[in-house]
Image (tube, rainbow, N blue to C red):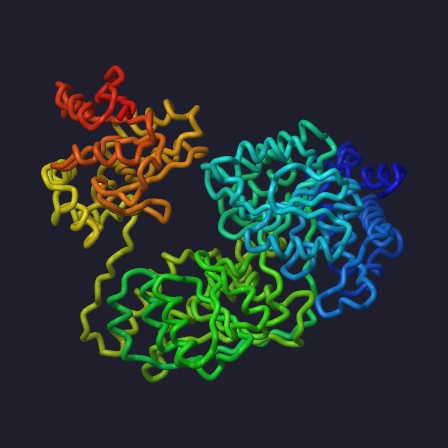
Amino acid sequence: MVSCQETNTYGSILTGAAVAGLHYGLDDETAQYLVDNRVAALWEAYTATEEVALDALGGEGGYYFNLIRDQFYAELDGAKSLPLPAEWSFRPPGREHDAPTPPNLMQRRTAHALSVRKRLGNWSGVGSGKTLAGILASRVTARRHTLVICNKAAVPGWSREIRSAFPDSVMRTSVGEQPQDERLYTVLNYEKFQQRNRRELVENLIAQGVDFVILDEVQFVKQRDNSVSVRRQSIHTLLSELEQCNPDLHVLGMSATPVINTLQEARKLVELVAGRTFADLDTKATVNNALAMHRTLMIHGLRYRPRYEIEITTDTLTVVRNELVDDLRAGEGVLQLEQTLLPPKLELVRPDIRPGTLIYTHYVDGMVYPVRSFVERMGYRVGLYTGGDKTGLEDFLTGRVDVLIGSKPVGTGLDGLQTRCDQIIMLSLPWTSAEYEQIVGRVRRQGSAFGSVRIVVPQVNLDHDGDVWSWDGRRMDTIRFKRTLSDCALDGSIPEVARISPKELEERGRVALEKWIERVRGGEAAVGVERPRLRIPLPPALKERLQVKVGDFTTLNNRWSTANSGTVHSRLQDDPAEWYLYHTLYREAREGWSEVPAVRIAEDLQARADLRVGDFGAGECLLRDALPDHDVVSLDHVALDDGVIACDMASTPLQDGELGTVVFSLSLMGRNWRDYLAEAHRVLQPFGFLFIAEPTRKWEDTTGLEEAVHKAGFELLPTTRRGNFVYLRGIKYS
C-alpha cells in the first residue's frame, strides 16, 4: 500500500483544479487530459526505451512541462517501488520450478493506480498481462473479497492464474455460503447476470462484502444504443449498491477493444467503470467526438501496447476461380458469399493444415461442418470452439486433438492457445481490425511456446487478363485500414477511413462484381439485380415491388386472417419477404396510433419480472424491448433475430407449463385462431396469465372472443376498451 503522503502527492498531481484557476484559460477536464495524454505518451516511450522518455524530461520548462514531469515521475516511482506481496508466486507455464516471475511494469502501474484512484480502466493490448495486473491489484489494495466477472470460457483461466499468483487464495466459481477468509475470489461468468435469479445473485454478493470488482473483457456489457440489456442493468445495479454499502469499493474494467462498433459503446463502458455519467460526450461518428472519447478513456484508464517478441508472418494464398461467378451472383447476403468461397479456400490451404493449427471462421452456419469434415478426411482429429460448442479447447491444449476450429468466441477472454498453437488459418475473416487483433492476440501473448506465429489468409479471385475481383481482398482491406474511429478513440490516431459495415461492403462488392462481368464480357451481359437482404423497414424500392406482388396492408391482413396458420407459416418460411413487408407496413400504421398494445400490456407486466413471458406473434419484438428485465420468449412465423423462435403459433416447441404469461398483441390472426388459445393453455403453468389485445373494429361484440377464451380453460377478468383496442385478461384455471 502507498503512504498517506504519497497518496496526497499523487492526488494533487491528477487534480485539474490546480490548473483551472490559471490564466491559461483551460477548464478542469481539458487541462487534466492534456497532462494525462502527455504522461501516457511518456509511459509508452518509457516501456519501449527508457532513455528516450527520461531524456525528454531533462532540463527546465514551463508550468505544464513541470506538471507533466512531476506526474510521470510520481507514477513511475509508485509503480517501480510498489511493495510486492510476500505471497506472490506466479510462474509462467513450463517454468513451474523456477523462481517466481516478478510482475511487469504495466501490472505494477495498474496496482499502484488502483491503490490511489479506486476505479480504473485498463485498455492495454492483447497479451499484455491484464489478468495478472488485476490479481496483483487485489492484494496490493488489501481487498478481502474480489469478484471477477468474465466470459464463460475464461473462468478456468482466471481460477488457474489466481492460484498461480497467490496459492493461498480461496477460490470459488459459484455463490453459496461465504468462506470465513480474507483472501476470497469469486469468479463468475457474465451469463449469470441475465438469468432469472439475477436479483438474488446480486443481493448475495452485496451481503458477502465484495470490495473489488474486476470486469474482464468489459465490452461484454456494452450498450450499442439506448436500450439497456438485462446483463448490463444487473451489473450496473450491483456496482451501485456495492458502493452504497462500501465507499471503498474498487473497480477495474479491462478490455483491449473498448471501442469496436460505435462511440456509444465506449461511453457506456467508461461510465460503468468510472461510476459516473458522461452525458456531454457526443457519440455521433465524427473525428472530434472520437478524440473526445480518447481523452475520456485516457483520463479514466491506462493503455499499454506491448512490444511483442513473437514474430508474426502473414501469408496470403490466392487462387483464380472464374467459374464461380454465377454462384457468387446468385448468392444472397454475406453468408452465402462465404459459403460459396469455402470449398476452393479449403483446397487452397490443404497443404498448410497440420497439428497445432487454429482454423478461424467468423460465420458458423454452413461453414463449421464442411471444414470439420474436410480436415477429418485428411486424417486429423478435430475439436470445436464456437458459440454453441466449446468442447474442443481442452482436448486441443492437451494434444488429444490436432486442429481446433473456432469462431468469434475465440477472440475474447481465452488464454492458453499460445502454448499449443503457432498457426492460424483465417478461412472467413472478422470484420474489424480490433477483432482481427484479438484473434491473433490469443497466440501472440505472454507464455507463448513459440518464437513465431504464421497467419494464413486464403483469397479467391476472379481474374481476367489482370482485371481482378476478390471478395476476400475487400474483406482484408477493411482490416488493413485499421485507423478507423475505433482506433482514434482508443489511441488518438486520426482515421484514414471510416469503418465500413458488412452490408455496405457486400453491396459495394456486388456492384464491383457486376462491373467486372461487364468488362470481361465486353458489356454484352445483362447486369444482375441484387436481391437485398431483408430487414424492417424494407428499402423503398423493394417495398414497392413487393406491394405490387402480394398486396397492401389490408390485403395481407385479410390473407393471413382467412387462412390456416400452418399454410401461412409454410408460405412465409419459403419466402419471408411477405412477412417483412407486412411488418414494414405495420410499423408505418403504428405511427398514427395513440397507444401501442404491446407497450400497454408491458406496463401491466413491469412489476412481475418473476414471470416468464411468451409473446405469441412477436413481430419486431416490441414486448421484449419494453421488458428488458424479463425473460421474454418471442415466437412468430419468421424470426426477426436469433432471439425469436420461428414456428406456427398453434404448435410451438415450448414445454407444458413452461410460461407464466402468454401475450397475444394483435396476433390472433388465422382461421384456426382458437388453436392458439389451446396452445397458450398448454404452455402456461397453473394460474398463469393470458393477455389479449385486439382491434375494436374486429370485435365490436366481444362475446364470441370471450366465450372462446373461457372454453380454452381460462377464467376471464373484466374486458376493457381503450381507444381503438379491446383488452382481455384471463387466468388458467384448469
Left or right, 616 with respect to 424, comes to left
- The residue closer to the viewer here, 610 or 36, is 610
Q: Quadrant of the N terminus?
A: top right
Q: Is residue 214 visible?
A: yes
- The residue closer to the viewer here, 314 or 286, is 314
- The residue closer to the viewer here, 200 or 523, is 200
Q: Is residue 299 visible?
A: no
Left or right, 375 with respect to 39, comes to left
* Above or below for 490 versus 280: below
Left or right, 209 with respect to 711, comes to right
Of all residues shown, which one is farthest toward the front? 734
The quarter of the displayed image where residue 350 is located: bottom left
Residue 208, position as x, y percentages in the image: 67, 34
The quarter of the displayed image where residue 643 is located: top left
Residue 212, position as x, y percentages in the image: 70, 40
Residue 165, position as x, y percentages in the image: 75, 56
